[in-house]
Image: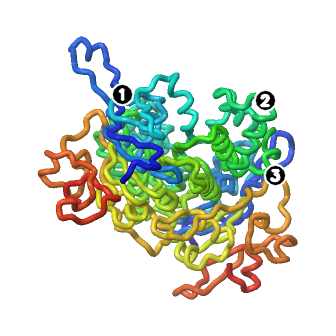
Amino acid sequence: MSLLEVRDLNVWFRLPGGGELHAVQGVSFDLGPGERFGLVGESGCGKTTSVLAMMGLLPPNASVAGEVRLSGTDILAGGEDSVRPHRWTDLAMVFQGAMNALNPVRNVIAQIAEPIMLHGSGGGAGGARGAGRVSAVAARKRAGELLELVGIPAAAGARYPHEFSGGMRQRAAIAMALACEPKVLLADEPTTALDVMVQAQITDLLVRLCEELGLALVLVTHDLPVVAQVCQRAGVMYAGEIVETGTTDSLFHNTRHPYTRLLFAATPDLYADDDVTSIPGAPPRLDEPIMGCPFLPRCDSVVDRCAAERPLLRLAGAADGAGEVRHAVACHRDDAGGTT
Amino acid sequence: MTSEGILLDVADLRTRYPVRQSIADRLARRPRQWVRAVDGVSFSLRRGEMVALVGESGCGKTTTAQTILRMVEATGGTITVDGQDITTMSQRRLRPLRRGIQMVYQDPYESLDPRFRVRQTVEEPLLVHGIGTSKTEREELISSALERAGLAPASLYLNRYPHELSGGQRQRVAIAAALALDPVLLLADEPVSMLDVSVRAGVLSLLDGLRRDGRLGVLMITHDLSTAAHFADRIAVMYLGRIVEYGPARRVVTDPRHPYTQALLSVVPNRDPRVRNVAQILSGETPNPVAIPSGCRFRPRCPIAEDRCADVDPALEPPGSGSGGGSAAHQVACLLA
């Protein structure tokens, strides 16, 4: 049993004019303690919606199906009532642009101390929650420790967000997510608006936190190289589903899905001389049923079956050292034994 | 290097902004402080060429472009476009020349007027500059600009609004609006950073193709070294308002000589997980351009700085010029390179 098991997660949004948009279509993945998993894909492919669904933070017009099991317990089973005890204490999130969402008129340490006072610090579900409220003094002390943990001197916490650089604000946002000692951290594009040097500092920090605290990380990003360097495994999302998943090593070296291959080809590499090519077309609309393979209109290696039947995610490739096949792909061409 | 074919020549360009003074500062007669955003930048660009200005935010890349466009006034140095010094030219004389220098902005979600159809967006610059007397003449210019920007057939796009277009198509409309004036120089400020990975290559290839036609030169501002290495002929790495390394793109990437360039390159993540760079993470961020360090401006963050770096502000020179090594094409502002 893994620490986190996401099973067949589906999200629909009811649209104002009637109709539904199927934003997440059967996403499944597992995560062990200290493990780092990347969710990559173009905008609109359902990455953020998936992690928001895991946190139980989708707007009221969304309906969710599937399971998010934390150490075996499905936290989505009872709706908001069953998610709330786990939110922040077991499962925490760094939102996209969180670094720009700090309250400008309160100093940083007070903002980190607040959730600690409200949720208690750590303990996980059930555990010490009854002990609940933490005194303001204790919460501030804990907030100082959290700042030190993410590489900011505790004394700097007395400063206001505008006195922090972008990198420091992102660190503070991460510290805030860690306030209640979660086991799983969901980070949505945590490095996107940052300079390369600061991006490297933040990815370094995330890896260190996973290694030191045994924190499991779900990294949502459109940046393949960042995933390649930070995560051990990843899922490539397209049109609401994971179309290929495996270790980052096998995703790069044994790419099986044409979308993954084209995504790599669209990412310029510093030292490679290969042509950088864009992927023609745009992702399909998700408010209409998709016939056949969702990637079909943009694919460069279509076979007859692609139009008739939607490919399912199937195990593919050779077993690893432990005798386990960990690479899976949703492509008919791959079923036929062809490689992309 | 001869000056033949040089489209844009920037020499020792300086732009500074005053720092707002508080009443207390004024009463105490504290001296006015300046943000030296561009502090001695020199480079040139030929027709058919693409030069990339690379650096972290706040290094002065965008101010350099704005100064070349005369959107902000230079406080020193010269800007020569097509042989004419435009640094202090009056706005009236500048106007016809300014037509030849066009800008493509970072965010096509912001830069296009949501109430303008594609036709109006591309027609606007023509009207401003009084080009094309008749509507049919303008219509032809609009269509050819759209098709040059890869939106063909133009008729398919003319009547659409920005919200009906994808990010990549919006940026192409913005490029078409710039191309309508048949510019000789295109300044592209982070032209793809707001776009999806899958369409970035298309927009970059478009800019690449435009300059390869030989009619114009492109100055691309980017923080992405991989993009610069792939598409630009030459890379200028900026740090705190100054170019610290300048040379052929491949050369700068494979044989960086300035410690700042080396550090920047070392943190670019590789898409192959087996390739682990030894990241040379510089602590902190670019210092405040109000108080630029004495001597070499990179010294406080430099991993190899020596005592003498505090005394000399190094000029941009071919590396190892003392020992006669290196070529003039590759230049570095470092005493130790």
Quadrant housing residue A51: bottom right
Compared to A242, does B108 lie above or below?
above
Considering depth in this image, is B26 or B98 the residue closer to the camera?
A: B98
| Residue receiving disc 1 | B17
Provide residue B225's location: percent of width, then percent of height. 45, 57
Q: Is residue B246 left or right of residue A88?
A: left
Q: Chain of mark 3?
A: A
Q: Position of residue B325 (x, y in %)?
A: 24, 66
Disc 1: which chain? B
Percent position of residue A119, x then y: 49, 44
Q: Quadrant of residue A104?
A: top left
Q: Which residue is mark 2?
A: B134
In this rendering, position of residue B68 left or right of residue A268: left
- In this rendered view, identify the residue nearer to me: A303 or A216: A303
Q: Amino acid at mark 2?
A: Ser
User: Marks 1 and 3: CB-CB under 8 Å?
Assistant: no
Which residue: 72% across, 84% down?
A: A338
Residue type highlighted by circle 3: Asp
Kindly identify which chain the residue marked by label 2 belongs to. Answer: B
The tag earlier along the polypeptide, 1 or 2, is 1
Is label 1 or label 3 in front? 1
Looking at the image, residue B328 lies above or below residue A325 = above
Q: Is residue A153 above or below residue B278?
A: above
Q: Quadrant of the N terminus of chain A?
A: bottom right
Image quadrant where one finds the C terminus of chain A: bottom right
Which residue occupies 74% across, 33% down?
A: B120
Q: How is the image coloured?
A: rainbow
> Whole-percent x and y of residue A129?
49, 49
Describe residue B136's horizontal placement relative to residue B121 as left or right. right
Q: Looking at the image, which residue is at 49% across and 72% down?
A: B272
